[in-house]
Amino acid sequence: MISKACFTPHRRLPSKTQCLDKYLQSELARCRGPPNREKPWEPFRTQLDFEVSEFAQENMLNRKATDKLISLIRRCAVNLDNFTIQNYSDMNKQWEGASKKCTKFQRYDVAVKYKGVDQIFEMHAQPLWDWTLDLIQDPRLASFFIWDAQRNYKYNGVRFIHFYTEPWTADTYWETQVYNPDAKLCPYIIYVDKSKLSSFGTEKVYPIIARLANIVVGIRNGNEWGGGQVVGSLPVVKDDTAESSKPGYVDFTNTTDTSISASPYVGQIHMGSR
């Protein structure tokens, strides 16, 4: 079976015809993702340093518990050279170094009216365009981004049939680029994962996940660098037993979810098409 790929007119690229099996093999190869860095744990000094630090963070160990963990590891380790962190403060310095590699989270105060009074909610999120630049400027990911619309066809023995695979093969993607020939689209997939509830002290939040839709599916749908990442947190509206049964309060909680999760990104998402 034969496949054919066509590109928007302004690109002036010839159609590409090839065996469908060869096309599918090339797509599969492209989805495998970038090679791993030689030392992906940097700026931590060793991989073991990072894994222990990650364990402490994931389990929300306080300073006393972290120092105890490090002390036990250092006593039990056969080779101390592989674990160089001395204590909680030393670990924090390395986390601070790692945080400078990516866009930092910022605080946003979001106001949502209920009964005519602004209710203020605090949330934290990464500026979306800065987060995007972290990815598209990474040379390891560069070859996995697709910046031009494409139409794919397969020959069924009688005629070529249009088929769809990735977002950039969709009709809307094609039409948008035809009418904006100088544009490079960078679409987003953003959602709140309400299956994962996290607690920070007395506050509860849901993670806001973002993915870039113009990176190949093997990376986009993964959890590694270039895949889905937490870019913000949606605070959970605390239950008010006196109000919870009222229709207006239900509308308020629904509106709050939408307003809070979208507010840091209003005015930013359009920048992805520049």
Image (cartoon, helix red, strand yellow):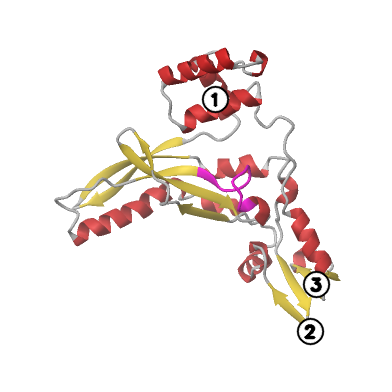
Residue type (three-letter) at the residue carrying disc 3: Lys
| For marks 2 and 3 on the same chain, the one whose residue lies earlier in the sequence | 3
Residue 268 in view of the camera: no
> In the rendered image of this protein, does residue 229 appear above or below residue 189?
above
Residue 247 placement, left or right of 86: left
Q: Which residue is mark 1?
A: 95
Residue at 49% across / 17% down in the picture?
A: 88
Residue 224: in magenta span: yes
Q: Residue at x 52, y 30 (%)?
A: 55
Q: Characterize the local packing of mark 2: few (<14), some (14-19) or many (20 or more) Cα atoms within 10 angstroms.
A: few
Location of residue 55 with respect to 131 vertically, above or below:
above
The label number, if any, that marks residue 4 in the structure image: 3
> For mark 2, what is the residue?
159
Classify mark 3: helix, strand or loop: strand
Residue 124 image point, x, y percent: 42, 38
Q: Which amino acid is tagged 1?
A: Trp
Magenta-tinted stretch? 220-230
Q: Nearer the viewer, residue 179 or 162?
A: 162
Does residue 158 appear in the picture of this structure? yes
Q: Residues within 10 Å of mark 3 (few under 14, many from 20)?
A: some
Q: Quadrant of residue 184?
A: bottom right
